[in-house]
Image (spheres, rainbow, N blue to C red):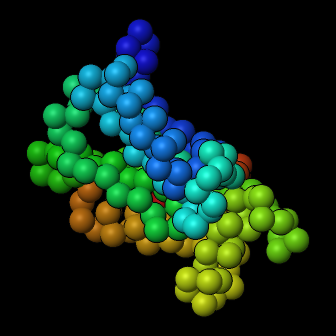
Amino acid sequence: MRKRNIDAPILPETKLNMNNYALKEKMRTVVAMHCEQGQIHTTNTPNFPTRKEKQPGGVATLLRGNHMTRFAGSENDPAGRWTVSRFYGRKNQLKMYSLYRVCVGSKKSGDTTAWIQQYNHFRKRHNKVVDPRKQVVKDIAQHLEKDIASGDEIILCGDFMRILKERTAFTKN
């Protein structure tokens, strides 16, 4: 990262169980050893068995470099679909999103897919049945609209599992 002057790698679909405390601490230790003022922010769908180190889906954002003097904090989506890193600007904030949109799935996909994890998350926590692919577009669009209304600058990175030439909520002006 230093050699190539990369300060913010975005890692959608990490396939790491960020609910596993030992794994999360290992990652933080490695980042601290190799990245001056570096931080890593991770998320994944909650309630996956914590003994396992692998979990479908997940997002990580690694931050380092001079812009860390303007770092204001980070937030995670409660369903584990994105992280947001916030930086102070002169007037407003810069928000850098790292998002993972699951690939097409179904109720028959089994417990080993990110699609079914997110489907079960919404079904159990919010008592509603949703298509995780459609729900992430709806939810991220609401967040981005609030950011735009606040005058925040936005960087949206991720694995969208879609050709962005098509007109969707991701590509509307």
Residue 113, located in which quarter of the rendered image?
Answer: bottom right
Q: Is residue 149 above or below residue 33?
A: below
Q: Measuring from the top left, give residue 10's x and y in whole percent.
A: 49, 38
Q: Measuring from the top left, give residue 44's x and y in whole percent.
A: 55, 56
Q: What's the residue at 25%, 50% (across, down)?
A: 73
Q: Is residue 105 above or below residue 165?
A: below
User: Is 128 positioned to the left or the right of 96 in the image?
Assistant: right
Furthest toward the top, the residue is 3
Residue 2, located in which quarter of the rendered image?
Answer: top left
Q: What's the residue at 22%, 42% (across, down)?
A: 71
Q: Is residue 153 above or below residue 131?
A: above
Q: What's the residue at 12%, 51% (across, down)?
A: 91
Q: What's the residue at 83%, 74% (across, down)?
A: 107
* Between 66 and 120, the one nearer to me in the picture: 120
Q: Is residue 164 visible?
A: no
User: Is 84 positioned to the left or the right of 173 in the image?
Assistant: left
